[in-house]
Amino acid sequence: MIDAVQRDPAASYERAAAALPADDVTVAVLSAQLGRPARGRPAVAHRCGHGLPTVARVDPRLEDGTPFPTTFWLACPLLRSAVGRMEADHEMVRLNERLAEDDGLRAEYATGADRYVAFRDALGAPDPPLDGAPTAGGMPTRVKCLHVHLAHHLATGDNPVGAHVADALLPMACPAPCVDTASAGAVAPGGAS
């Protein structure tokens, strides 16, 4: 077992922007990880120690013009499960309380949201606000989805809420690759689900 998921000290918006669109094998791997077809011309913005996608960068609009709800998508099944447990344990409630009380965190969160919007808008046509918010995951006023914040942080090194989630979960041990890349889509025995 290795600590497969770790922060990447080189993570940045520039590096996330430079990620090339995924080839067919990588799209198949992402689809297997997600349990559904990967959409939005994904590019890998962060990889685990097994070399598999952890975070996908997704275009702001799907091929048919539909706005995509986030720019960074958490692909790792093991991480998604762990973040889901944090959400079930009411971590979003606690983080929203901290945002309400901590002026510094609130300012850092809002500034990160501005950088996120600028990055997303540079990728393509700006999205209209979804659910009344100009960004993903409730930014800049609330915390709505820890998955989005962790993905944003892993891909760019930005996002204080994502950093909080990373502090709680990383490094994350993984027994085996979650996808067998040789067959591009077959789940490996003992892999995360």
Image (spheres, grey):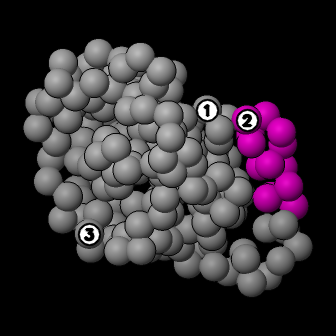
175 in relation to 164, above or below = above
Give the class, few, some or many, for how many residues have Cα within 10 Å of label 3's Cα (few <14, many ≥20): few
The disc, 3 or 2, on the residue closer to the chain's N-terminal end is 3
Tags 3 and 2 touching, CB below 8 Å: no
Task: Determine the image quadrant of residue 186.
Answer: top left
Q: Is residue 169 left or right of residue 176?
A: right
Q: Is residue 117 left or right of residue 106?
A: left
Tag 2: amino acid: Arg
Residue corresponding to mark 3: 15
Tag 1: amino acid: Ser
Q: Nearer the viewer, residue 143 or 153?
A: 153
Q: Is residue 89 magenta?
A: yes
- x and y percentages locating residue 22 in the rendered image: 16, 42
Give the class, few, some or many, for how many residues have Cα within 10 Å of label 2's Cα (few <14, many ≥20): few
Q: Main secondary structure of the magenta part?
A: helix
Q: Judging from the image, what secondary structure is the residue with disc 2 in?
A: helix
- Tell me the distance, in whole angstroms, between the alpha carbons under discs 2 and 1: 6 Å
Residue ID at (80%, 58%): 96
Residue ID at (60%, 56%): 170
- Tell me the distance, in whole angstroms, between the alpha carbons under discs 3 and 2: 30 Å
Q: For residue 139, say whether it is visible.
A: no
Tags 2 and 1 touching, CB below 8 Å: yes
62 in relation to 49, above or below = above
- Tell me the distance, in whole angstroms, between the alpha carbons under discs 3 and 1: 26 Å
Q: Is residue 4 left or right of residue 11?
A: right
Which portion, as a residue range, is magenta? 85-97
- The mark found on residue 85 in the picture is 2
The disc, 3 or 1, on the residue closer to the chain's N-terminal end is 3
Q: Judging from the image, what secondary structure is the residue with disc 3 in?
A: helix
